Image: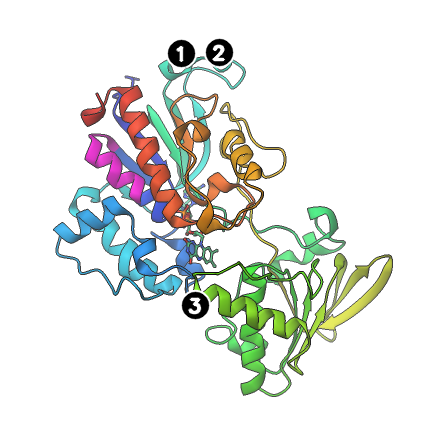
Amino acid sequence: MPDPARNTLAIVGAGPIGLEAAIAGLDLGFDVHVFERGEVGSHPLAWGHVRMFTPWRMNLGPRSLEHLRRAGWVAPDPEAFPSGLEYAEGYLHPLARLPGLSGRVHTHAQVVHLGRRGTLKGDWIGDPRRREFPFRLLVRDPGGRESFLHACSLIDASGVYGQPNWAGDGGIPARGELYLAPQLGYHPDDVLGLKRERYAGRRTLVIGGGASGATTVTNLAALAEQAPGTAVAWATRETADTLCLPVADDPLPGRRALYERARALARGTHAAVVHIGGMRVEGFEFNSATHRYRVTLLIGEQPRVEEVDEVLVNTGFGPDDSLYRELQVHECYATRAPMKLAAALLAGGGADCLATPAFGVETLSNPEPDFYIVGHKSYGRSSNFLLETGFKQVDEVLGKLAKDQRVGAGV
Ligand SMILES: Cc1cc2nc3c(=O)[nH]c(=O)nc-3n(C[C@H](O)[C@H](O)[C@H](O)COP(=O)(O)OP(=O)(O)OC[C@H]3O[C@@H](n4cnc5c(N)ncnc54)[C@H](O)[C@@H]3O)c2cc1C
């Protein structure tokens, strides 16, 4: 089999960062192919009912915007806040349809494994000569048919939304959780819209004190005002005093309002919402006669049992590192992000996402040459990622790849 050309670039994931990388790659003379497991923008589509905290002007990749404008696309009001659905349909879909990307974005093409042809993970340790062996992607279509594709550069922009964290204490599944997981919810459900019937007039346990949990609980509280009998038990590791703490001089009004509302609900201002702070989740049971769950929580060593009709686990997301198990990637043992970037982020002491810079291409590099993890996945389990940071990462990574591969403008 002949070697692929030096300018071949494979990208995993057609989210906003994968597509910005594709456009930047085209600009620099790469032969780009994007492999996407679902639809273009399938993650923002999945949280389509959630309104973004950042306005349009912060959510558009500079290179993508330039290409779209040239094609006659009219940008939305830069100060408006799109929902996930508006973002995917109004921006990502037209972007993927641009003539330059035609035939280069392969949807329903899941990348199952990544390696290098003709060498193993343990060979040529941290040696740039690994780039003599092209990347090898095992790609599967919805019918289960598998093919191999090869490229000299590889970008993983596959996000984290597909891998929700478990509810149980210590980050591992609670008793019964593995078995019941298929019938529990692990994403911020559209409780006021598409999934309304499931939650109206019923008691739901929401687990998790981050932005997703807060969004779900505030929406369920709104539903309780329309549908009598709707009730929420909100279980968080944080206490009511430490939950959704305000960001000093928060410039994002949507986030400020959500956190204020969530803190008020946790303090008991709504009759339909009970907050259970400082808890760990111990076990789930499902009674098939009553169709209700019994969930055992621990507060200190004291068990507390909640009986509910539905359970929504909103405990965050993490990267799928099984994809690059055969590549030489140095992962952070705390966040599972690429080590150097993780260290830079941890040194920042969990600063607010708006205050977090892109730390430069060096922090994104791996022992594996020409392989980069960008976008939300580059933050591992940290939820602090912002699109603006991802667009900067793309710029830096593509510039470096073009230089290292002697491609186009970077030569
Ligand atoms: C509810 C929510 C609200 C958010 N709001 C904001 C906001 O207001 N502002 C902001 O800046 N950020 C926000 N974020 C954070 C972040 O910007 C988004 O998660 C964004 O979608 C990340 O873009 P991405 O391109 O890195 O990954 P994603 O958008 O997650 O895209 C990854 C893509 O890779 C695909 N994929 C996954 N695995 C494979 C595989 N094995 N093979 C092929 N394809 C694969 C997925 O199907 C997906 O389409 C929000 C996140 C969430 C969850």
Which quarter shows the N terminus? top left
What amino acid type should be assigned to the residue bearing mark 2? Trp
Instruction: For label 2, count other residues whose C-alpha is less than 10 Å away and answer few (under 14), some (14-19) or many (20+).
Output: few
Q: Is mark 1 on a helix, strand or loop?
A: helix
Q: Does residue 262 sit above or below 208 in this rendering?
A: below
Task: Tell me which corner region of the image, top left, top right, bottom left or bottom right, holds residue 147.
Answer: top left
Dominant secondary structure of the magenta stretch? helix
**Magenta-highlighted residues:** 20-31
The residue at the point 51 percent across, 26 percent down is 329
For marks 3 and 2 on the same chain, the one whose residue lies earlier in the sequence: 3
In front of the other: 284 or 404 = 404
Instruction: For label 1, count other residues whose C-alpha is less than 10 Å away and answer few (under 14), some (14-19) or many (20+).
Output: few
In front of the other: 89 or 209 = 209
Mark 3, residue position = 49
Q: Alpha carbon of mark 2 to alpha carbon of mark 1: how far?
A: 7 Å
What amino acid type should be assigned to the residue bearing mark 3? His
Task: Tell me which corner region of the image, top left, top right, bottom left or bottom right, holds residue 265.
Answer: bottom right
The residue at the point 16 percent across, 53 percent down is 69
Mark 2, residue position = 124
